[in-house]
Image: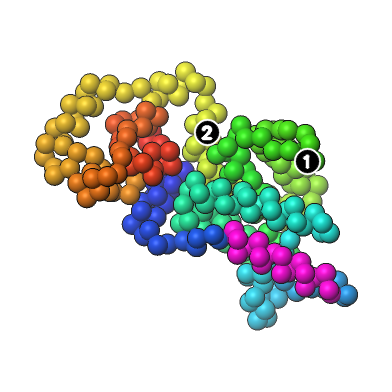
Amino acid sequence: MRAFMRMVDRFCAKHPNFGIPNLMLYVVIGNAAVFLFGSMDTTGMFYYWLALNPASVLRGEVWRLVTFALIPEASGLWVIIFLYFFYYIGSSLEHAWGPGRFTLFFMSGVLFNILYAFVVYFLGWNVYVTASYIYMSMFFAFAALYPEQRVLLFFFIPIKIKWLALLDGAFFLYAVFVNPFPVNLLPLVAIANFLLFCGGDLFSALRPSSVRYRANTVNFRREAAKIRKEQNARPYRHKCAVCGRTDTDYPDLEFRYCSRCAGYHCFCEDHIANHVHFTE
């Protein structure tokens, strides 16, 4: 997982224009439009024509590959709360990760659902899929980044995000056992996408503090001598391990070393708090 995230970070650093800025804003607008049109539908078939269904896609209804991700998972006034909450979560993830990584995370969730739907279709099951578990996996990612943040449950009960994430996890587990096959495996597909992008940091945070300390303990005297030797042989003193910017090319940029990484790794001010920690 960490190797995958390092590859993602390197890709985003080499392609800084990759990604869709304010992606969640467009997703929320799409959800709102679908809800408005759906509320005017008297047949009750509008959402049915937008959900992902492999048999229908193979008959030419290719729009379902996109529109299934725009079906709101709420009704009535709850739609406003739903859209606002997930816009806040998506925007927070994009701010922490950058547009490139967040775009990859969201699109990966969409792709995983599409692949799963077609795999079970060719195995003999035809399913209708929406993006409900994609949004819930976004909440897991938000909780992994900001576990101590508080929100108001039912608008007046303060509760930490990590406890809501546990409740969300219980709902996932309930859906696995209650829903019929193969729909019951969709929560696991969403969890797989979450672990792919956040599993490394999550497992590191769950390790006992003594284990984390031993894993991240380095000989700074030896590493400092190694760094000085390397610096004497190159035309810069500091280079970001994520984006590759140096203090020679960007003299006004601040560089720091991460104490949580195994080894002696330097990061610019944009990535010192936003990178996958080195473990070896």
Picture layout, residue 208 above or below residue 134: above
In front of the other: 249 or 37: 249
Q: Main secondary structure of the magenta part?
A: helix
In front of the other: 114 or 228: 228
Left/right placement of residue 93 relative to residue 220 reads: right
The answer to which quarter of the image holds residue 145 is top right
Magenta residues span 24-41
- In percent of width and height, residue 161 lies at 66, 36
Mark 2, Cα crowd under 10 Å, few <14 / some 14-19 / many 20+, is: few
Q: Mark 1 points at which residue?
A: 155
Name the kind of residue labelled 1 in the image. Phe
Residue shown at 77% from the left, 34% from the top: 157
Q: Earlier in the sequence, mark 2 or mark 1?
A: 1
Residue shown at 36% from the left, 22% from the top: 217
- In percent of width and height, residue 109 lies at 58, 56
Residue 69 falls within the magenta-colored stretch: no
In front of the other: 130 or 123: 130
Mark 1, Cα crowd under 10 Å, few <14 / some 14-19 / many 20+, is: few
Which of the labelled discs sits on residue 79, or is there none?
none
- In percent of width and height, residue 160 lies at 67, 33
Left/right placement of residue 151 relative to residue 47 reads: left
Q: Mark 2 points at which residue?
A: 203
